[in-house]
Image (cartoon, helix red, strand yellow):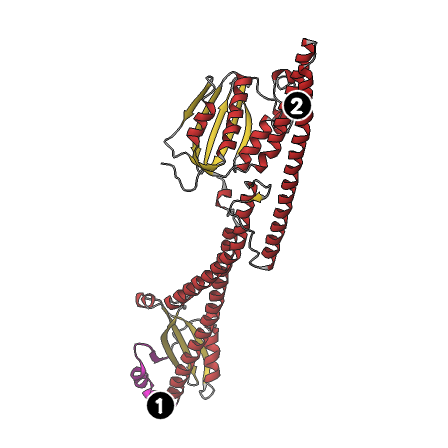
Amino acid sequence: MNLRRFVPDSILAWLLLILVTAVLASQAVTVLLHNINRNEVLLRLEDQRAAERIAALATFLDHTAPILRRGVADAMSGPSLDVRVGPEPLVAQPQPPRDLVPLATALADRLQRVAWREIRVGAGIIEARHAARAVVPVRVAIRLADDSWLNFEFPMVADLPWASPQLIGLTIGSVVAVLGLCLYAVLRLMRPLNRLTRAAESLGRAGVDAGGRLVRQGGERLPEQGVGELRRAASAFNAMQARIARLIEDRLQMIAAISHDLKTPITRLRLRAEFMADNELRQKMLADLDEMETMIGATLAFARAEGNPEPAAAIDLRALLREAAEHQSAATLDIAGDGPWMTICQRLALKRALGNLIDNAIHYGARAAIALSRKGQAFEILIEDDGPGIPEGEMERVFHPFYRLEQSRNRNSGGTGLGLAIARAAILAQGGTIELQNRKDAGEAVRGLRVRVLLPADPGSSAS
Protein backbone atom coordinates (compact mmCIF):
# COMPACT_ATOMS: atom_id res chain seq x y z
CA MET A 1 0.00 0.00 0.00
CA ASN A 2 1.45 3.34 -1.06
CA LEU A 3 1.06 5.77 1.83
CA ARG A 4 2.71 8.68 0.03
CA ARG A 5 -0.52 9.48 -1.79
CA PHE A 6 -2.04 10.38 1.59
CA VAL A 7 0.79 12.82 2.37
CA PRO A 8 0.07 16.49 1.47
CA ASP A 9 2.06 17.76 -1.49
CA SER A 10 1.59 21.51 -1.07
CA ILE A 11 2.58 24.12 1.51
CA LEU A 12 -1.07 25.06 2.05
CA ALA A 13 -2.07 21.46 2.76
CA TRP A 14 0.89 20.97 5.13
CA LEU A 15 0.10 24.18 7.04
CA LEU A 16 -3.56 23.25 7.35
CA LEU A 17 -2.66 19.74 8.53
CA ILE A 18 -0.23 21.12 11.13
CA LEU A 19 -2.74 23.74 12.33
CA VAL A 20 -5.63 21.28 12.55
CA THR A 21 -3.50 18.72 14.38
CA ALA A 22 -2.04 21.31 16.77
CA VAL A 23 -5.40 22.95 17.57
CA LEU A 24 -7.19 19.63 18.08
CA ALA A 25 -4.36 18.24 20.22
CA SER A 26 -4.21 21.44 22.29
CA GLN A 27 -7.97 21.49 22.82
CA ALA A 28 -8.05 17.78 23.69
CA VAL A 29 -5.24 18.10 26.26
CA THR A 30 -6.78 21.25 27.75
CA VAL A 31 -10.25 19.69 28.09
CA LEU A 32 -8.75 16.48 29.52
CA LEU A 33 -6.70 18.26 32.18
CA HIS A 34 -9.58 20.60 33.02
CA ASN A 35 -12.04 17.74 33.46
CA ILE A 36 -9.61 15.67 35.53
CA ASN A 37 -9.08 18.57 37.94
CA ARG A 38 -12.79 19.43 37.95
CA ASN A 39 -13.83 15.85 38.68
CA GLU A 40 -11.34 15.57 41.54
CA VAL A 41 -12.59 18.79 43.09
CA LEU A 42 -16.27 17.85 42.72
CA LEU A 43 -15.71 14.38 44.21
CA ARG A 44 -13.88 15.89 47.17
CA LEU A 45 -16.76 18.32 47.68
CA GLU A 46 -19.15 15.37 47.55
CA ASP A 47 -17.11 13.66 50.28
CA GLN A 48 -17.16 16.81 52.41
CA ARG A 49 -20.93 17.24 52.13
CA ALA A 50 -21.57 13.57 52.91
CA ALA A 51 -19.20 13.71 55.90
CA GLU A 52 -20.90 16.83 57.31
CA ARG A 53 -24.38 15.27 56.95
CA ILE A 54 -23.38 11.98 58.59
CA ALA A 55 -21.45 13.76 61.35
CA ALA A 56 -24.50 15.91 62.17
CA LEU A 57 -26.80 12.87 62.36
CA ALA A 58 -24.26 10.86 64.39
CA THR A 59 -23.86 13.72 66.86
CA PHE A 60 -27.64 13.96 67.28
CA LEU A 61 -28.06 10.19 67.77
CA ASP A 62 -25.12 10.07 70.20
CA HIS A 63 -26.95 12.57 72.41
CA THR A 64 -30.22 10.64 72.10
CA ALA A 65 -31.21 8.08 74.69
CA PRO A 66 -30.24 4.56 73.55
CA ILE A 67 -33.82 3.33 73.86
CA LEU A 68 -35.01 6.04 71.42
CA ARG A 69 -32.21 5.76 68.85
CA ARG A 70 -33.90 3.14 66.65
CA GLY A 71 -37.09 5.18 66.29
CA VAL A 72 -35.17 8.39 65.66
CA ALA A 73 -32.95 6.61 63.07
CA ASP A 74 -36.02 5.27 61.25
CA ALA A 75 -37.51 8.75 61.23
CA MET A 76 -34.33 10.20 59.75
CA SER A 77 -34.11 7.61 56.97
CA GLY A 78 -35.14 8.58 53.41
CA PRO A 79 -34.53 7.74 49.75
CA SER A 80 -31.10 9.34 49.78
CA LEU A 81 -29.97 8.16 53.21
CA ASP A 82 -30.68 5.00 55.20
CA VAL A 83 -29.93 5.21 58.94
CA ARG A 84 -29.95 2.18 61.22
CA VAL A 85 -28.89 1.40 64.80
CA GLY A 86 -27.79 -2.11 65.67
CA PRO A 87 -25.25 -4.32 67.40
CA GLU A 88 -23.37 -5.19 64.17
CA PRO A 89 -21.68 -2.96 61.58
CA LEU A 90 -22.74 -2.92 57.92
CA VAL A 91 -19.05 -2.67 56.91
CA ALA A 92 -16.99 -5.78 57.55
CA GLN A 93 -13.52 -4.44 56.75
CA PRO A 94 -12.01 -1.94 59.17
CA GLN A 95 -9.81 -0.36 56.46
CA PRO A 96 -11.60 1.72 53.81
CA PRO A 97 -10.91 1.28 50.08
CA ARG A 98 -8.49 3.72 48.52
CA ASP A 99 -11.17 5.82 46.81
CA LEU A 100 -13.10 6.18 50.12
CA VAL A 101 -10.14 7.21 52.29
CA PRO A 102 -10.92 10.94 51.84
CA LEU A 103 -14.48 10.34 53.09
CA ALA A 104 -13.24 8.41 56.13
CA THR A 105 -10.73 11.18 56.94
CA ALA A 106 -13.39 13.88 56.60
CA LEU A 107 -15.72 11.94 58.94
CA ALA A 108 -13.02 11.56 61.58
CA ASP A 109 -12.33 15.30 61.48
CA ARG A 110 -16.03 16.17 61.97
CA LEU A 111 -16.83 13.70 64.76
CA GLN A 112 -14.82 15.51 67.43
CA ARG A 113 -17.88 15.90 69.69
CA VAL A 114 -18.96 12.24 69.44
CA ALA A 115 -17.63 9.54 71.73
CA TRP A 116 -16.91 7.13 68.89
CA ARG A 117 -14.54 4.21 69.11
CA GLU A 118 -14.24 3.11 65.45
CA ILE A 119 -15.21 4.36 61.99
CA ARG A 120 -15.57 2.01 59.04
CA VAL A 121 -16.24 3.08 55.46
CA GLY A 122 -16.92 0.68 52.59
CA ALA A 123 -18.89 0.10 49.38
CA GLY A 124 -22.41 -1.28 49.38
CA ILE A 125 -24.05 -3.76 47.06
CA ILE A 126 -24.59 -2.25 43.58
CA GLU A 127 -28.11 -2.81 42.31
CA ALA A 128 -29.81 -2.02 39.01
CA ARG A 129 -31.22 1.23 40.33
CA HIS A 130 -27.73 2.39 41.22
CA ALA A 131 -26.35 1.60 37.74
CA ALA A 132 -29.25 3.44 36.10
CA ARG A 133 -28.44 6.59 38.08
CA ALA A 134 -24.63 6.22 37.67
CA VAL A 135 -24.12 6.11 41.46
CA VAL A 136 -22.55 3.65 43.88
CA PRO A 137 -23.85 2.82 47.39
CA VAL A 138 -21.52 3.79 50.23
CA ARG A 139 -21.79 2.41 53.77
CA VAL A 140 -20.50 4.05 56.96
CA ALA A 141 -20.46 2.31 60.34
CA ILE A 142 -19.66 4.29 63.52
CA ARG A 143 -19.07 2.43 66.77
CA LEU A 144 -20.16 4.43 69.77
CA ALA A 145 -18.86 4.22 73.35
CA ASP A 146 -21.61 1.79 74.36
CA ASP A 147 -20.54 -0.58 71.52
CA SER A 148 -23.66 0.07 69.49
CA TRP A 149 -23.24 0.78 65.78
CA LEU A 150 -24.68 3.64 63.79
CA ASN A 151 -24.98 2.37 60.19
CA PHE A 152 -25.47 4.74 57.26
CA GLU A 153 -25.99 3.86 53.59
CA PHE A 154 -26.29 6.48 50.86
CA PRO A 155 -25.55 6.83 47.13
CA MET A 156 -22.61 8.83 45.83
CA VAL A 157 -21.64 9.81 42.30
CA ALA A 158 -19.55 7.02 40.79
CA ASP A 159 -17.71 9.22 38.32
CA LEU A 160 -18.30 12.41 36.43
CA PRO A 161 -18.43 12.49 32.61
CA TRP A 162 -15.34 13.77 30.83
CA ALA A 163 -17.30 16.47 29.06
CA SER A 164 -20.84 17.74 28.93
CA PRO A 165 -22.66 18.36 25.62
CA GLN A 166 -22.34 22.10 26.24
CA LEU A 167 -18.58 21.82 26.73
CA ILE A 168 -18.22 19.67 23.61
CA GLY A 169 -20.22 22.18 21.57
CA LEU A 170 -18.18 25.08 22.93
CA THR A 171 -14.93 23.26 22.17
CA ILE A 172 -15.98 22.46 18.61
CA GLY A 173 -17.08 26.06 18.08
CA SER A 174 -13.77 27.43 19.35
CA VAL A 175 -11.81 24.96 17.18
CA VAL A 176 -13.78 25.95 14.10
CA ALA A 177 -13.30 29.65 14.86
CA VAL A 178 -9.55 29.25 15.38
CA LEU A 179 -9.17 27.15 12.25
CA GLY A 180 -11.18 29.67 10.25
CA LEU A 181 -8.89 32.49 11.34
CA CYS A 182 -5.81 30.35 10.67
CA LEU A 183 -7.11 29.41 7.21
CA TYR A 184 -7.69 33.06 6.39
CA ALA A 185 -4.17 33.94 7.54
CA VAL A 186 -2.63 31.05 5.60
CA LEU A 187 -4.50 31.95 2.41
CA ARG A 188 -3.35 35.56 2.68
CA LEU A 189 0.18 34.32 3.26
CA MET A 190 0.02 31.97 0.28
CA ARG A 191 -1.44 34.51 -2.17
CA PRO A 192 1.89 36.24 -2.94
CA LEU A 193 3.59 32.83 -3.17
CA ASN A 194 0.97 31.65 -5.68
CA ARG A 195 1.54 34.81 -7.72
CA LEU A 196 5.25 34.13 -7.67
CA THR A 197 4.65 30.53 -8.83
CA ARG A 198 2.41 31.62 -11.71
CA ALA A 199 4.90 34.32 -12.69
CA ALA A 200 7.77 31.80 -12.74
CA GLU A 201 5.72 29.40 -14.87
CA SER A 202 4.77 32.20 -17.26
CA LEU A 203 8.36 33.38 -17.47
CA GLY A 204 9.39 29.91 -18.62
CA ARG A 205 7.00 30.29 -21.58
CA ALA A 206 7.74 33.93 -22.32
CA GLY A 207 8.64 35.42 -25.67
CA VAL A 208 10.16 38.63 -26.94
CA ASP A 209 8.62 41.39 -28.96
CA ALA A 210 9.95 42.80 -32.20
CA GLY A 211 12.39 44.96 -30.25
CA GLY A 212 13.90 42.04 -28.41
CA ARG A 213 12.18 42.92 -25.11
CA LEU A 214 10.95 40.11 -22.87
CA VAL A 215 7.18 39.65 -22.92
CA ARG A 216 5.85 37.47 -20.10
CA GLN A 217 2.36 36.05 -20.22
CA GLY A 218 0.40 37.85 -17.52
CA GLY A 219 2.40 40.96 -18.37
CA GLU A 220 3.18 43.31 -15.56
CA ARG A 221 5.98 43.29 -13.04
CA LEU A 222 5.33 40.97 -10.09
CA PRO A 223 3.90 42.98 -7.14
CA GLU A 224 6.24 43.01 -4.14
CA GLN A 225 3.61 42.33 -1.47
CA GLY A 226 3.15 40.09 1.55
CA VAL A 227 5.49 39.31 4.44
CA GLY A 228 9.13 40.33 4.34
CA GLU A 229 10.45 37.02 3.01
CA LEU A 230 7.94 36.98 0.14
CA ARG A 231 8.61 40.64 -0.70
CA ARG A 232 12.31 39.89 -0.96
CA ALA A 233 11.58 36.81 -3.10
CA ALA A 234 9.38 38.88 -5.42
CA SER A 235 12.06 41.58 -5.63
CA ALA A 236 14.71 38.96 -6.47
CA PHE A 237 12.39 37.46 -9.11
CA ASN A 238 11.82 40.86 -10.74
CA ALA A 239 15.56 41.51 -10.77
CA MET A 240 16.20 38.08 -12.30
CA GLN A 241 13.50 38.71 -14.90
CA ALA A 242 15.11 42.01 -15.85
CA ARG A 243 18.52 40.34 -16.18
CA ILE A 244 17.05 37.60 -18.37
CA ALA A 245 15.40 40.24 -20.56
CA ARG A 246 18.71 42.04 -21.01
CA LEU A 247 20.53 38.78 -21.79
CA ILE A 248 17.94 37.78 -24.41
CA GLU A 249 17.98 41.23 -25.94
CA ASP A 250 21.78 41.25 -26.13
CA ARG A 251 21.80 37.76 -27.63
CA LEU A 252 19.26 38.61 -30.30
CA GLN A 253 21.18 41.72 -31.25
CA MET A 254 24.35 39.66 -31.48
CA ILE A 255 22.57 37.04 -33.61
CA ALA A 256 21.24 39.70 -35.94
CA ALA A 257 24.75 41.12 -36.35
CA ILE A 258 26.29 37.68 -36.97
CA SER A 259 23.57 36.84 -39.49
CA HIS A 260 24.21 40.05 -41.42
CA ASP A 261 27.99 39.77 -41.26
CA LEU A 262 28.08 36.10 -42.37
CA LYS A 263 25.51 36.24 -45.15
CA THR A 264 27.33 39.04 -46.96
CA PRO A 265 30.68 37.21 -47.50
CA ILE A 266 28.83 33.95 -48.29
CA THR A 267 26.89 35.77 -51.01
CA ARG A 268 30.15 37.20 -52.43
CA LEU A 269 31.75 33.75 -52.39
CA ARG A 270 28.73 32.28 -54.17
CA LEU A 271 28.99 34.94 -56.91
CA ARG A 272 32.70 34.26 -57.37
CA ALA A 273 32.12 30.52 -57.48
CA GLU A 274 29.67 30.94 -60.34
CA PHE A 275 32.50 32.33 -62.50
CA MET A 276 34.90 29.46 -61.86
CA ALA A 277 35.93 27.61 -65.03
CA ASP A 278 36.33 24.20 -63.36
CA ASN A 279 32.77 22.84 -63.18
CA GLU A 280 33.56 20.10 -60.64
CA LEU A 281 35.33 22.50 -58.30
CA ARG A 282 32.50 25.01 -58.72
CA GLN A 283 29.88 22.43 -57.68
CA LYS A 284 31.89 21.42 -54.63
CA MET A 285 32.28 25.02 -53.53
CA LEU A 286 28.59 25.76 -54.05
CA ALA A 287 27.70 22.65 -52.02
CA ASP A 288 29.96 23.82 -49.21
CA LEU A 289 28.34 27.27 -49.31
CA ASP A 290 24.87 25.68 -49.20
CA GLU A 291 25.91 23.65 -46.17
CA MET A 292 27.24 26.78 -44.47
CA GLU A 293 23.98 28.62 -45.10
CA THR A 294 22.02 25.66 -43.75
CA MET A 295 24.12 25.54 -40.59
CA ILE A 296 23.85 29.29 -40.06
CA GLY A 297 20.09 29.17 -40.58
CA ALA A 298 19.69 26.28 -38.15
CA THR A 299 21.90 28.01 -35.60
CA LEU A 300 19.89 31.21 -35.84
CA ALA A 301 16.63 29.25 -35.57
CA PHE A 302 17.84 27.52 -32.41
CA ALA A 303 19.07 30.77 -30.89
CA ARG A 304 15.73 32.45 -31.60
CA ALA A 305 13.66 29.53 -30.28
CA GLU A 306 13.38 30.96 -26.76
CA GLY A 307 12.66 34.41 -28.13
CA ASN A 308 9.83 33.44 -30.44
CA PRO A 309 7.55 36.53 -30.67
CA GLU A 310 4.58 34.46 -31.83
CA PRO A 311 1.62 34.93 -29.41
CA ALA A 312 0.11 31.89 -27.73
CA ALA A 313 -3.46 30.96 -28.64
CA ALA A 314 -5.90 28.08 -28.17
CA ILE A 315 -5.55 25.57 -31.02
CA ASP A 316 -6.91 22.12 -31.89
CA LEU A 317 -3.98 19.75 -31.36
CA ARG A 318 -5.59 17.05 -33.51
CA ALA A 319 -5.83 19.40 -36.49
CA LEU A 320 -2.27 20.62 -35.90
CA LEU A 321 -0.93 17.05 -35.97
CA ARG A 322 -2.73 16.36 -39.23
CA GLU A 323 -1.19 19.47 -40.79
CA ALA A 324 2.30 18.56 -39.54
CA ALA A 325 2.04 15.04 -41.03
CA GLU A 326 0.10 15.73 -44.23
CA HIS A 327 3.22 16.02 -46.42
CA GLN A 328 4.51 12.60 -45.35
CA SER A 329 2.82 9.58 -46.93
CA ALA A 330 4.63 7.25 -44.48
CA ALA A 331 2.99 8.90 -41.48
CA THR A 332 -0.18 7.51 -39.82
CA LEU A 333 -2.27 9.22 -37.14
CA ASP A 334 -4.31 7.39 -34.51
CA ILE A 335 -6.52 9.44 -32.15
CA ALA A 336 -7.90 7.86 -28.96
CA GLY A 337 -11.03 9.49 -27.55
CA ASP A 338 -13.40 12.22 -28.67
CA GLY A 339 -11.60 15.27 -27.29
CA PRO A 340 -11.79 18.18 -26.97
CA TRP A 341 -8.19 18.58 -28.08
CA MET A 342 -7.63 22.25 -27.27
CA THR A 343 -4.27 23.44 -25.98
CA ILE A 344 -2.76 26.90 -25.58
CA CYS A 345 0.53 27.24 -27.48
CA GLN A 346 2.49 29.05 -30.16
CA ARG A 347 0.98 27.34 -33.18
CA LEU A 348 3.76 27.71 -35.76
CA ALA A 349 6.55 26.86 -33.31
CA LEU A 350 4.77 23.71 -32.13
CA LYS A 351 3.91 22.70 -35.71
CA ARG A 352 7.56 23.01 -36.74
CA ALA A 353 8.67 20.97 -33.71
CA LEU A 354 6.19 18.16 -34.36
CA GLY A 355 6.95 18.21 -38.09
CA ASN A 356 10.64 17.91 -37.31
CA LEU A 357 10.02 14.87 -35.08
CA ILE A 358 7.84 13.24 -37.75
CA ASP A 359 10.42 13.91 -40.47
CA ASN A 360 13.18 12.42 -38.28
CA ALA A 361 11.11 9.29 -37.64
CA ILE A 362 10.55 8.74 -41.36
CA HIS A 363 14.13 9.63 -42.30
CA TYR A 364 15.77 7.29 -39.79
CA GLY A 365 12.99 4.73 -39.23
CA ALA A 366 11.09 4.53 -42.56
CA ARG A 367 7.72 5.36 -40.96
CA ALA A 368 6.06 7.54 -38.32
CA ALA A 369 3.17 6.04 -36.33
CA ILE A 370 1.56 8.96 -34.49
CA ALA A 371 -0.86 8.45 -31.57
CA LEU A 372 -2.74 11.19 -29.72
CA SER A 373 -4.53 10.65 -26.38
CA ARG A 374 -5.46 12.54 -23.26
CA LYS A 375 -3.85 11.80 -19.89
CA GLY A 376 -5.65 13.79 -17.21
CA GLN A 377 -4.83 17.46 -17.72
CA ALA A 378 -2.29 16.80 -20.47
CA PHE A 379 -2.19 15.47 -24.03
CA GLU A 380 0.18 12.62 -24.90
CA ILE A 381 1.69 12.39 -28.38
CA LEU A 382 3.61 9.23 -29.32
CA ILE A 383 5.71 9.08 -32.50
CA GLU A 384 7.14 5.64 -33.26
CA ASP A 385 9.46 4.45 -36.03
CA ASP A 386 11.20 1.26 -37.09
CA GLY A 387 14.75 2.60 -37.03
CA PRO A 388 17.83 1.44 -35.13
CA GLY A 389 16.91 3.37 -32.01
CA ILE A 390 19.34 5.33 -29.85
CA PRO A 391 21.75 3.89 -27.24
CA GLU A 392 20.46 4.39 -23.71
CA GLY A 393 23.47 6.48 -22.77
CA GLU A 394 22.83 8.88 -25.67
CA MET A 395 19.15 9.62 -24.94
CA GLU A 396 19.86 12.96 -23.29
CA ARG A 397 22.90 13.93 -25.36
CA VAL A 398 20.98 13.91 -28.66
CA PHE A 399 19.11 16.97 -27.40
CA HIS A 400 22.38 18.91 -27.09
CA PRO A 401 23.03 21.41 -29.90
CA PHE A 402 25.24 20.10 -32.75
CA TYR A 403 25.38 16.60 -31.24
CA ARG A 404 25.04 13.82 -33.84
CA LEU A 405 25.21 10.05 -33.52
CA GLU A 406 28.06 8.48 -35.48
CA GLN A 407 26.00 5.84 -37.28
CA SER A 408 23.21 8.07 -38.56
CA ARG A 409 23.56 11.77 -37.92
CA ASN A 410 26.57 12.58 -40.05
CA ARG A 411 27.18 15.02 -42.84
CA ASN A 412 26.30 12.49 -45.52
CA SER A 413 22.85 11.93 -44.02
CA GLY A 414 22.15 15.64 -43.73
CA GLY A 415 21.22 17.57 -40.63
CA THR A 416 23.22 19.79 -38.35
CA GLY A 417 22.55 18.21 -34.99
CA LEU A 418 20.08 20.96 -34.06
CA GLY A 419 16.76 19.35 -35.03
CA LEU A 420 15.99 17.73 -31.68
CA ALA A 421 17.42 20.69 -29.76
CA ILE A 422 15.08 23.08 -31.61
CA ALA A 423 12.13 20.71 -31.15
CA ARG A 424 12.71 20.38 -27.41
CA ALA A 425 13.15 24.15 -26.98
CA ALA A 426 9.84 24.77 -28.78
CA ILE A 427 7.98 22.09 -26.77
CA LEU A 428 9.38 23.30 -23.45
CA ALA A 429 8.33 26.84 -24.36
CA GLN A 430 4.71 25.56 -24.51
CA GLY A 431 4.98 24.10 -21.00
CA GLY A 432 5.40 20.54 -22.34
CA THR A 433 7.96 17.78 -22.04
CA ILE A 434 9.66 15.41 -24.47
CA GLU A 435 11.46 12.12 -23.89
CA LEU A 436 12.90 9.31 -26.02
CA GLN A 437 12.40 5.58 -25.51
CA ASN A 438 13.63 2.56 -27.47
CA ARG A 439 10.92 0.16 -28.64
CA LYS A 440 11.87 -3.40 -27.76
CA ASP A 441 10.41 -6.81 -28.54
CA ALA A 442 10.00 -9.73 -26.14
CA GLY A 443 13.67 -10.59 -26.55
CA GLU A 444 14.74 -7.05 -25.57
CA ALA A 445 15.93 -6.34 -29.10
CA VAL A 446 15.50 -2.74 -30.24
CA ARG A 447 12.77 -2.41 -32.90
CA GLY A 448 12.63 1.34 -33.23
CA LEU A 449 12.39 4.62 -31.37
CA ARG A 450 9.43 6.14 -29.52
CA VAL A 451 9.18 9.88 -28.93
CA ARG A 452 6.77 10.85 -26.13
CA VAL A 453 5.53 14.45 -25.95
CA LEU A 454 3.27 15.79 -23.21
CA LEU A 455 1.46 19.12 -23.68
CA PRO A 456 -0.85 20.81 -21.16
CA ALA A 457 -4.55 20.82 -22.02
CA ASP A 458 -6.50 24.07 -22.14
CA PRO A 459 -7.92 24.56 -18.60
CA GLY A 460 -11.10 25.87 -20.22
CA SER A 461 -11.80 22.51 -21.88
CA SER A 462 -12.54 19.18 -20.24
CA ALA A 463 -12.53 15.61 -21.47
CA SER A 464 -15.91 14.30 -22.52
- Residue range in magenta is 63-86
The residue tagged 1 is 65
Crowd around label 1: few <14 · some 14–19 · many ≥20 (10 Å): few
Foreground disc of the pair 1, 2: 2
Q: Let me know if residue 73 is in the magenta part.
A: yes
Of 105 and 262, which appears nearest the observer? 262
The amino acid type found where label 1 is placed reads: Ala
So how many labels did they put on this image?
A: 2
Q: Is residue 104 above or below residue 10?
A: below
Which quarter of the picture shows residue 343?
top left
Residue receiving disc 2: 267
Residue drawn at 52 percent across, 26 percent down = 451
Instruction: Look at 55% across and 27% down and name the residue there.
Output: 436
In the image, residue 337 sits, relative to residue 173, either above or below, namely: above
Residue type at numbered disc 2: Thr
- Residue 167 marker: none
